[in-house]
Amino acid sequence: MRKIISKHKREKKIKTKQIIIGGLLMFVMLFSILGYSFQGEKIENSKKLNYNDFEFIEQNGFWFTNIKSFQFVFKYNPEQVEEINSELKSLENYYNQPLYISSEDSGAELEIYRNLFYQNQIVQRMQPACLEECEEDLPIKSCRDNFIIIKESEYVNIIQNESCVFIEGPQENLTMLADEFLFNILEIR
């Protein structure tokens, strides 16, 4: 059987529940605001690097910089990458042109894809291709086309031959070399 409760006690019980729920909501809102403000501090406290008048900001393990109206994202900053003196064509040679790529390293390929196509839409399209005969069903291109060839080698090199760029080095350095290539064509170096 149910207890008979006076109207006054029932209203007091409802009011107590409302106060508890209201207090909990205020507590959640307060900590949400504090969490959001600490998140903002984390962004402000991220690492910054000035290199040749370019500001690089590290966030989530990547380095960001703005050039003209584009934002570029790198796995490494210029101080982490060995400078390789290469005579490379500038970024203007890639604008609204198809870019062909042959790569033995997905990380290095992703670095170029993210900066020249996905993030900034600088190149018209980016497509896998072969420089010579290939076993896969890919188009065969020549050095008259914008073509980047990334391959493993014991020697570190970035060479421009007509419109072909050869990025060569040990497997573990290919992403760094892709960043070095980007630093050069973006005229960061």
Image: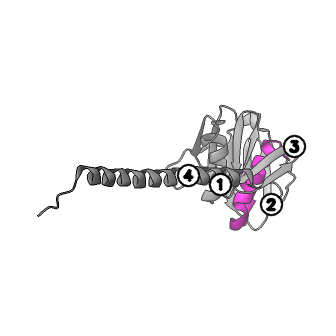
Distance between the alpha carbons at the discs numbered 4 and 1: 12 Å
Distance between the alpha carbons at the discs numbered 2 and 3: 17 Å
Q: Residue at x 72, y 45 (%)?
A: 164
Distance between the alpha carbons at the discs numbered 2 and 1: 29 Å
Are the two marked residues, 1 and 3, in contact with CB atoms closer than 8 angstroms? no
Q: Relative to 169, is 141 above or below?
A: above
Residue at numbered disc 3 = 53
State which tag comes first along the sequence, 2 or 3.
Answer: 3
Whether residue 143 appears in this view of the structure is no
Are the two marked residues, 4 and 1, in contact with CB atoms closer than 8 angstroms? no
Quadrant in which the N terminus is drawn? bottom left
> Please, what is the three-letter code of the amino acid marked with disc 1?
Phe
Q: Which residues are magenta?
A: 166-189
> Please, what is the three-letter code of the amino acid marked with disc 4?
Leu
Residue at numbered disc 4 = 30
Q: Which label was assigned to residue 38?
A: 1
Are the two marked residues, 2 and 1, in contact with CB atoms closer than 8 angstroms? no
Q: Nearer the viewer, mark 2 or mark 3?
A: 3
Q: How far across and how far down the image is residue 178, in percent?
A: 72, 54
Are the two marked residues, 2 and 3, in contact with CB atoms closer than 8 angstroms? no
Secondary structure under the numbered disc 3 in the rendered image: loop
State which tag comes first along the sequence, 1 or 3.
Answer: 1
